[in-house]
Image (tube, rainbow, N blue to C red):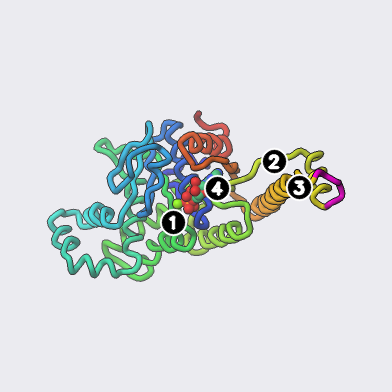
Amino acid sequence: MSLYDRNLILFSGKGGVGKTTIASSYALSCARRGQRTLLMELNVRDKVASYFGSQEIGSEIVTVEDNLHAVNVTPDAAMEEYGMMILRMKLVYRAVFENRVVRTFLQAIPGLNDLLMIGKAWHHATETDADGGPVWDTVVVDAPATGHGIFLLQIPSVIMSSISSGHMYREAEKIFSFLTDPQKTALNLVTLAEDMPVNETKMLRDQARQKLEMPIGCVVANGLYPQTFDQRERDWIDAAHEGNLSVDAGVSGMINAAAFRQQRIDMQQHYMDEIERSFDAPIARVPYYFEDRITFPVIESIAERLADQLDPEGAP
Ligand SMILES: Nc1ncnc2c1ncn2[C@@H]1O[C@H](COP(=O)(O)OP(=O)(O)O)[C@@H](O)[C@H]1O
Ligand SMILES: [Mg+2]
């Protein structure tokens, strides 16, 4: 089943591997296919706005492109909306959640913020309009890095195993069955073709299977260097680098730099082979962009690559 047919698309992986970049690009690729898309950051310093050249993204949903909307969920705002949904009544919500003592108490409950945020993501993924149609075709979540991500996604089942009935239990159960449904949800793994990120990604995959029971969508191998040299040049660089070829002393720095680049490319190839051997999910490759910073044209380019690789026969 194509990733593009599912409703809740989460991206996690080691810190700094490109989760936010890839989640933003994937969300754009959905929007470009005509899907009404919501991109969610979870209580982080907003980065998405800079990619889309929009105003800073806060807890109000804003439009950043045709069909593409974004929000940065804060626990407070989620508490207000989701807490109110649970309690149904504004007055009761006010009396309970806006009481200072209750608030301080609630903030001390481990996992409450995460429950509110995953609850909000689930809420948007299942939200319907007045005619009963879905408000969003796709909700894309820029999830926290591995450890925190697992913690966050485990919250519903933790609640289910610690309380056995009641309103809270039923809420958690609804979220859990949505998160674990391969027709609806996909947890996608972003990694670099490097030792530590690949190991962490395997760990995340194992936890997703065993602890979370969540379906894996795809693996995104990010930041891949293009092959810079052809075979003849590589032989020449090797020979010069190893001192088997005499070169002008003035270019020795260049030779070292070229040899270093080729080593990086070889190392990435080694870890790409390992990624191919270790994961049975579709793999999307995203190149390293040699830019000062990631801007909209880069996001567009990554969006196209993701769509081409993850659903080559899909809508434009
Ligand atoms: N394919 C890429 N090419 C070049 N730079 C990238 C690429 N992907 C991510 N980056 C840069 O790497 C850094 C980390 O990316 P980010 O998406 O913020 O990672 P994460 O959300 O996993 O912490 C950012 O500065 C981002 O601009
Ligand atoms: Mg990020």
Closer to the eye: label 4 or 2: 2
Q: CA distance from mark 3 to mark 1?
A: 44 Å
Q: Earlier in the sequence, mark 1 or mark 4?
A: 1
How far apart marks 1 and 4 lie (CA) works out to 17 Å
CA distance for labels 4 and 3: 42 Å
* Residue type beneath disc 2: Gln
Above or below 281: residue 150: below
SS at badge 3: helix
Q: Earlier in the sequence, mark 4 or mark 3?
A: 4
Per the model, the C-alpha gap separating discs 2 and 1 is 32 Å
Q: Which residue is mark 1?
A: 144
Left or right: 197 as drawn, with respect to 35: right
- Estimate the spatial distance between the alpha carbons at disc 4 and disc 2, rounded to whole Å: 24 Å
On the rendered structure, is 98 left or right of 307?
left
Q: Name the dominant secondary structure of the magenta segment.
A: loop
First reached walking from the N terminus: tag 3 or tag 2: 2
- Residue at x-position 44% and y-position 62%: 148
Instruction: Indicate yes or no whether the magenta region holds residue 107.
Output: no
Residue at figure coordinates x 59%, y 42% from the top left = 287
Q: If you read the primary sequence from the N terminus, does the residue marked by circle 4 or circle 2 appear first?
A: 4
Q: Earlier in the sequence, mark 3 or mark 1?
A: 1
Q: Are marks 1 and 4 in contact (CB under 8 Å)?
A: no
Part of the protein shown in magenta: 243-248
Residue designated by label 4 = 218
The residue type indicated by label 1 comes to Pro
**Residue placed under numbered mark 2 in the picture:** 227
Q: Secondary structure at mark 4?
A: strand
